[in-house]
Amino acid sequence: MLKAPTPRSFLMAFSFIMLLFPLLSACGASGSGTSQSSTPVKGGTWIDDVYQEPSSFITNGPSFDAFAVNQTLWAPLFYGDSQGAIHPGLVTEIPTVANGDISADLKTWTFKLRPGLLWSDGQPLNADDVDFSWKLWTNPKFPAASTIGFNLITSAEVATDKLSITFHLSAPFSPFISIWTDGFVAPLPKHHFAGIAPDKILNTPDNLNPSVTSGPFMMSESKPGDHYTLVRNPHYYRASEGLPYLDKLVLRIVPNLDTVLKDLQAGSVTSAYRLDVTKRPTYEQLTNYHLVHAPFSGSYENIYFDFHNPILGKELTVRKAIAMAIDHQALINTALRGVGSPQCTDHSKAYNPGYQADAPCPTFDPAAASALLEQNGWTKGPDGVRTKGDQRLEFQYSAASGNPTVTVAEEIIQANLQAIGIKINIHNYPSSTLDEIQAAGKPGQYDIVQFGNLYDYDADDANSLSCSQFPPNGYNTTFYCNPALDKLYAQEEATTDPAARQQIFNQIHQIYLTDFPIIILYGKFNLGIAKKTTRNFLPGPFSTGDTVNVWDWWCDGGHC
C-alpha cells in the first residue's frame, strides 16, 4: 500500500551527518542570521547573485538552470522545504491511498486544487491549467526537460467545478507526486499559451519574461544577461498570509564566481548560492555574511558520453578504462578542497531507497586501465595517444565555463586520461549554450560532457538514461539505450516497498558500473551565503536550492 510521502528527515542519515559535521560546524547556523526580532517584517529589496543564467523560465522547459528562478515565479501543486519534505501547494492535500486519491494499483491519481486560485493577471487558475500543462510537456514539438511519468498519462478528467483532476496512467508510477513538486514543474496558464504552437512557445517574449505567472513574485523587468527584477504578486495564493514578505527580488546575472566574491566583499548583494568551494576560507572572513547550507544533498557531478561517437558509443573497453583511470579522491581533495564525498552511483546517502552502500565502485588503477586498452588493440603512438586502425583516442571534453571547481577537475581528468593514452581537448561552453546543445540533442558538439545532476524528491533516475528520454523530448543526452535498464526503471517506478525498490536500484547500479554509460565523479555539497540581517535563507537539498522557501525570506526592519 502506498503511504503518504513522509517528511524527508529520515534522509539525514547519521553517517551522512557525521561525514559533513566539519563542514556544518564551519558554516554555522543554517540561515537564521543574527536578527534580533523573530517577527517577520514586510518590505525590502533582496539582491541575489545568479551564476549560470537560465535559457528559459517556461516550466519543464529545457533549462535546468531555471529551477531556482522558477520557484519564485510559479506556484507548484506541491513544494518541498529545506529538509526535503513535500507539502501541498496549489492542492489541498497530499494524495494517498488512504484518503482515496490514489488507487491501490497506483494507476489512478486525483489532485484536488484550492478554490479561488488566480493567475497574476487575475484570471482563474484551475484544473484546466494542470491538464493543459501535462499535454504540452508530452507534445513531441515541445522540448520538455523530462516527460518521465507524464508520458504514462493516458487520460485526465477535469471535474465540472474545475477543482480537481484525475489522471489515469498506463502503468503504476510511485513517484507521481514528486514529478509535480516545486516551481520547475508548476502548471502553466492555459488561457495565455493555448493559442501558441508548442514549438513556438520558447520563441515568445515569455521565455525569459513571463507575463502571466502564479508564484510569490512576478516579473517586473527582464534584462537577460544583466538582471531580472521581480515584484510581489498580489494574486499569490498565500497573499492573505502576508506572503511573500519582500517587496522585490533582484536576480543579478554574474559572469563568473569571482564576480560573486567581489560583490560579497563590497556588500552589494544580499545572498548568493553555489559558491566556489575553493574560496570557503575567504567567504568565512566576510563578517557581515554567514554561510548557509542544506542539511544534506542529493547532488553529484558526473560525465556523460555522447553515444553518437563511434568509439565511445561502441567500445565498452574505452569507457571502462576511463572509469578506472580517474582519480576521484584527487578531485575531492583538490577541486573541492575536501567539500565533497566519494560516490560512484547517482544516488547519495540522501536517498532511501536509492543509496547503495556496497556498490561495486571501480578501483582507481591507471596501470590496469592501460593494460585493458592494450589487450584490446589500442596501442600508443609516438605522441602517447592510443590508436587502433584509423581510430584515435582523442575526444572533446566540455562543461559549463566559468566555474573554478570544474576547471580544476577538468585538468585532473585530462592528466589522468593522458596517463593511459587518451587525449581530451577541453572546450567549454557558457551554461546557457550547453543547455541549448543538450536540450536539442545536437551530436558532435562534444564527446564527453561534465555537469552536475540529482533527482530531487525521489530516487527515480529514468529521466537520465531511459530510451524514451532522448532530446528534444527528454534529457537522456547520452543517447544511450538499454532495454534491460528500461525494464528496471519500470519496475522501480511500480514498487512502493522500500526494501524491494532498493534491490531494483542495486540492479540499475550494476548496469551503470559495468556498461559505464555515465561515470559519477563525486558527491557535491552546495554552499550559499546571506547577510546576517536576513532571515529564512534556507537552501533545500535538491534542484530548487536556495529559493525553495523564497516566500518566507525577510530582512531586519524590512531593509536588506
Image (tube, helix red, strand yellow):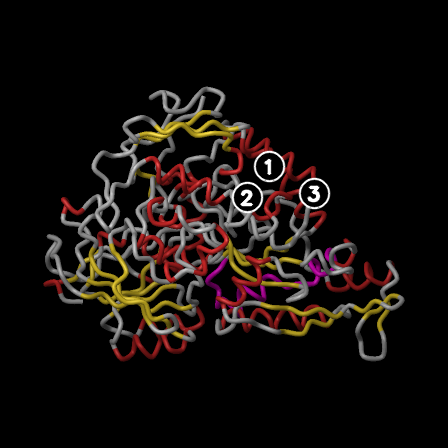
Quarter of the picture containing the N terminus is top left
Q: Quadrant of the C terminus?
A: bottom left
Q: Which mark is residue 489?
A: 1
Residue 296 point in image, percent of width and height: 40, 50
Q: Nearer the viewer, residue 414 or 15?
A: 414
Q: Earlier in the sequence, mark 2 or mark 1?
A: 2
Residue 199's label in the rendered image is: none
Query: Which residue is at the front of the view, 309 or 20?
Result: 309
Q: Position of residue 96 (x, y in %)?
A: 37, 26
Is residue 116 a member of the stretch shown in magenta?
Answer: no
The residue drawn where x is 50% and y is 50% is 144
Say whether marks 2 and 3 touch (CB < 8 Å): no
Rounded to the nearest whole Å, what is the CA distance between mark 2 and mark 3? 14 Å
**Whole-percent x and y of residue 540?**
35, 51
Residue identified by numbered label 3: 482
Q: Secondary structure at mark 1?
A: helix
**Looking at the rendering, which quadrant does residue 117 occupy?**
top left
Q: Nearer the viewer, residue 341 or 159?
A: 159
- 428 left or right of 111? right
Q: Which residues are magenta?
A: 319-340
For this view, does 76 lie left or right of residue 453? left
- Lower sequence index among marks 3 and 1: 3
Q: Residue at x 41, y 36 (%)?
A: 177
Name the residue that disc number 2 marks.
Answer: 461
Q: Main secondary structure of the magenta part?
A: helix
Q: Secondary structure at mark 2?
A: loop
